[in-house]
Amino acid sequence: MNNRTDRTRPVRNNLFAQFFSRLLIPMLVAFLLASFGTVLIGYTSRQKESHQYRQQTMQSFATSLSKPLWDCDNTTAQGILEALVNQPSVISGKIEELCQKQRMTAGPDQTKKCGNLMERSRITYMDEFNREHELGTLEVAFLKPSISGTLLEVLWQYFLLFSLLLAVLLLSTLKIFRQLISIPLANFQAIINGSGDAADGVALLDKEIQKRNDELGDVMIAFNELVRELANVIDKLHQNEISLSEMARRDPLTGLGNRLVLEEELTRALARSQRSGRSGCVLLFDLDGFKPVNDQYGHEAGDLVLQQTARRIQSVVRTTDTVVRLGGDEFVLIAENMEGRQAIENLVNKLTGTVAEPIQYNEHTLQIGVSTGVAVFPDEGESSTALLAKADREMYRAKRKNRDVQTGEPVTD
């Protein structure tokens, strides 16, 4: 937003202040009544906690006692019983075990006192055949929660009153939130999730922003600006992704495809050949005399030779053929639908003659030869690896033959 817009907007209302001022009186009334209801809530909570604690304690120690009593190890069982008596809220404990028909006790005798809670649990053992065996009983005396019985008789009245007033408070809160937050947020969400023309969505959002003069209005403004920024960022990222993907598949010097393109296109060509039954070929080119050009005239001359070679190959082949630079001074051509060996030989001769034409570099004339290896698919290979290996062997055989013709010496490439 610009400064002019900031000056025309009135002083912003605080959303929290609006909410608090409207909810203050119901909150004060509910707080006063909640102080009475807390007694009941606390008592109920302690009752539940006490019951859960007793159940967990009985279950835990009954499980701990099963193995010693199964083994008739009353010494260990007595130690476990004394550990039980040391637990909070536990007064005494007693075990009636069936193995040696003995009674084990810990803590004071509570059998004649009625002010405590007595819990009784069977002690059983499950053998390896999943059979249950009775080992005895565990009886424990727990302290009873100390809350006045008289107070307990009237707690339900406070609980009912608190529930009624809490319902009033909740209804008031829901109504206030509906007016201040729920309805505007629902409209905001409908705009965000709405389908249709993006321009209509922006117009609706601008219209909703004009109604708001608080934090929610600020959120809508920030969201509107964020959406626009994100759209720009996503567009730039998409463009960068396309550029990087293309760069990863292209040789930067010649503009030809690289090894990734070779593998993809050769795989597709083999699949099409299998479906149609028509033959194709892979031609592997290696430039003869390229290294002396680099050594004598520099890498600039070598780059010119590679660029000229790429253009000359592309000028001879069909638009459906694929030309890639394999690396260094090696190029690969994938030609589909070739009618017989004679058509392949004609293509090789034409490419060899075109590539071998002199290249002008400043005042120098550069002469480059070509060694070519051919692999026909599917006859000489049904995978890219096999075809490239076959073409590579043929190419080195041709290079050796060319070297022998020129120097009379065998080559050791």
Image (cartoon, rainbow, N blue to C red):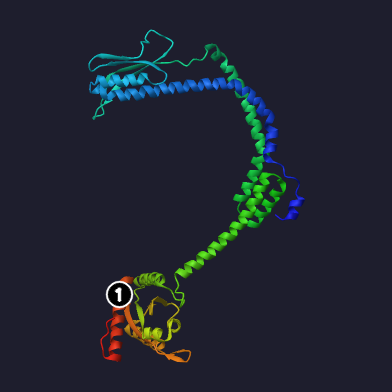
Left or right: residue 243 versus residue 181 is left
- Does the image show residue 84? yes
> Which quarter of the figure has residue 87?
top left
Q: Nearer the viewer, residue 62 or 324?
A: 62
Residue bearing the label numbered 1: 389
Which quarter shows the C terminus? Answer: bottom left
**Quadrant, the N terminus:** bottom right
Helix, strand or loop under label 1: helix
- Up the image or down, 352 lies above or below 96; here it is below
- Placement of 23 over or under 378, stated as above or below: above
The residue at the point 24 percent across, 23 percent down is 70
Q: For this view, does 35 lie left or right of residue 244?
A: right
Crowding near pointer 1: few (<14 within 10 Å), some, many (20+)? Answer: some
Q: Amino acid at mark 1?
A: Ala
Q: Is residue 382 visible?
A: no
- Picture coordinates of residue 49, whole percent (x, y): 46, 23
Q: Nearer the viewer, residue 88 or 374?
A: 88
Rendering coords of residue 370 (x, y %): 36, 85
Name of the residue lying farthest toward the top: 112
